[in-house]
Image (tube, rainbow, N blue to C red):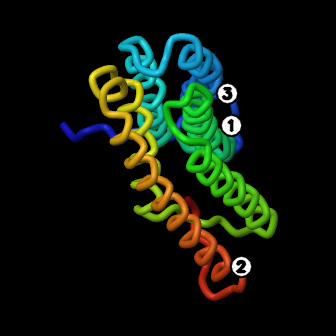
Amino acid sequence: MSAEVPRSTFGPSAVATPANALTLGRLLATPLLVALVVLTGPSTWLLACLWLVCAGSDGIDGWVARRQGATRSGAFLDPLADKFLVLGVLAALASIGEVGWVPVVLIAGREFAMSAFRIMAGRRGVSIPARQTAKLKTLLQDLVVGFALIPPIGLHHVGLIRDLLWVAVAMTLYTGIEYLHDGRRLLAGAGPARTT
């Protein structure tokens, strides 16, 4: 008996999908997490568990989307939810003095600039794929936030958190340069547009 191959349940234009529901849940949970960081932070087990659920849902909604059919709305909402979550919690940590504002602003500037560039390229029919380094950048950002929220690390190793955040900033800016280079090449017609 052969293994059943999963078939796409949703077409590319679908909006109401299980994957999008998970992504929307992550978006809606972010203000609660941000408020809790400000009110009870910087580090509690509740915050660490909520972060694990929110950050972990990114992988789950991607898995669901691959099984049931990726959508254009999901391709837009998923990275938006990731940025909203990471930047929201980093801003909350900065507001209570756990991390500095400069690295948070640098990360935010890169993310907003690349999102604007992606939209501009999309209007010209060009899709710019994410490199593996961009996935590493996201992982680094998630780890920094996670470490900051876990009590044994966040409460006793603030210097480590701040150093790791600067590593994440460096990777974030580097991947922004890569993305800009790839986008300009594709927009100039040096290579075919690939889907992300």
- Give residue 106's mark: none
Q: Where residue 179 appears, x then y in whole percent?
A: 58, 68
* Amino acid type, residue under disc 2 in the picture: Leu
- Rounded to the nearest angstrom, the CA distance separating label 3 from label 1 is 6 Å
Provide residue 62's location: percent of width, then percent of height: 47, 39
**Foreground residue, 151 or 74?**
151
- Estimate how packed mark 3 is, as few (under 14), some (14 to 19) or many (20 or more) residues with alpha carbons within 10 Å: few
What is the C-alpha distance between the residues marked 2 and 3? 32 Å
Q: Which picture quadrant has residue 122?
A: bottom right
Secondary structure state at the residue bearing disc 1: loop
The one nearer the camera, 161 or 12, is 161
Q: Position of residue 164 (x, y in %)?
A: 38, 48
Task: Give the image quarter of residue 84.
Answer: top right
To which residue does mark 1 refer? 14
Which SS class for mark 3?
Answer: loop
Q: Are marks 3 and 1 in contact (CB under 8 Å)?
A: yes
Q: Nearer the viewer, residue 63 or 37?
A: 37
Look at the numbered discs 2 and 3 and tell me whether their residues touch, using CB distance below 8 Å.
Answer: no
Q: Are marks 2 and 1 in contact (CB under 8 Å)?
A: no
Packing grade of label 1 (10 A; few <14, some 14-19, many >=20) is: some
Residue drawn at x 70%, y 33% is 15
Q: What residue is pinned by disc 2?
A: 187
Q: Nearer the viewer, mark 2 or mark 1?
A: 2
Q: Which mark is residue 16?
A: 3
Q: Is residue 12 visible?
A: no
Is 163 located above or below residue 61 in the figure? Answer: below
User: Nearer the N terminus, badge 2 or badge 3?
Assistant: 3
Q: CA distance from mark 2 to mark 1?
A: 27 Å
Residue at coordinates 36% horizontally, 27% vertically from top-left? Answer: 154
Residue 143: x %, y % from top left? 37, 39
Q: Is residue 78 left or right of residue 44?
A: right
